[in-house]
Amino acid sequence: MLFSKTMALPGWSSVGRWTLFGTLACVVASLVFTAVLFKDLDAELTRRLFVGATVVPTIIGAPLFFFFSLRLRTLTRANLRLNRVARTDGLTACLNRSAFTSRVNDWLAKAPADASGALLMIDADNFKAINDRYGHEHGDAALTIIARAIRSTLRSGDIVGRMGGEEFAVLLPGVNQYQAQIVAERIRLSVIVTCFAPEGQAHPLSVSIGGVAFSAPTNFAELFRIADQHLYGAKHAGRNAVVVASVEDHPIIKLPLSA
């Protein structure tokens, strides 16, 4: 749900292959060099030189290639961790706004012409009141609970991100408007039944959800505009509500071309 395309972490088998092939390459190079340089020597001396040309690169090369392979594995792991941190919201473990937008744009660009899906915009209701009453630490806890409730209703191929503040977004590939409405209702109900008890006092949580379903090529900016419009409608209708429409019911706004 969350992960993006990153470099693969080399396994121990890869470390072994690098060590083996690197050492063999050194041995072969050493043998070729010895054969060319000392081809006129007698047989016994040539045999000893070939033994030395085999043993020395093996003794020196194998530990060196093993060390450098381990270093490469360590650096790759560190890069994976940094990439994950850079793309992930530290509080909720969802994609951050930039990473979510990039993932959705990539999906839309690669999707076939008849691909369908839906974008949901989710906003925590009365969140300012939680911060004002209990403090930002409990507000952060509420956001974590809401994010967990959202993820619990989604499939492995769905994409979820935190757009900022108390607002989340979800891309549902391959669904129609009716199915998107069902998923949105599941998210709403999943948040309602969560347990949030700051300072030992139970406090209800709820979200408002606006969404838009599509079945033709589109772009993230257009989906975001329509979904956000319906999110506003859900909040204006009294909050703790879901409004999902079809992109076909809305006029397309042509964005101005950049200079």
Image (cartoon, helix red, strand yellow):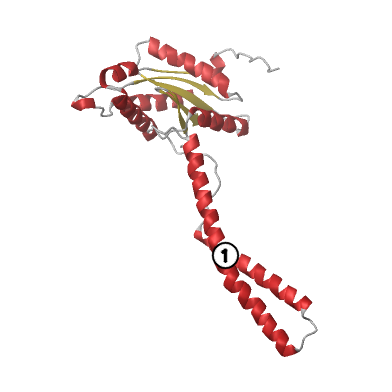
Q: How many marks?
A: 1
Residue name at image x 57 percent, y 19 percent: 222
Position of the C terminus, as image quadrant, is: top right
* Depth order, front residue of 50/233: 50
Residue name at image x 64 percent, y 70 percent: 24
Q: Is residue 3 visible?
A: no
Amino acid identity at mark 1: Leu
Check the image and report above or below for 235 versus 32: above
* Depth order, front residue of 253/22: 22
Q: Quadrant of residue 54?
A: bottom right
Q: Position of residue 50 (x, y in %)?
A: 68, 81
Q: Position of residue 84 (x, y in %)?
A: 48, 40
Q: Quadrant of residue 33?
A: bottom right
Side of 122 relative to 213 (left or right)? left
Side of 127 relative to 54 (left or right)? left
Residue name at image x 41 percent, y 28 percent: 183
Instruction: Give the secondary structure at mark 1.
Output: helix
Q: Which residue is mark 1?
A: 64
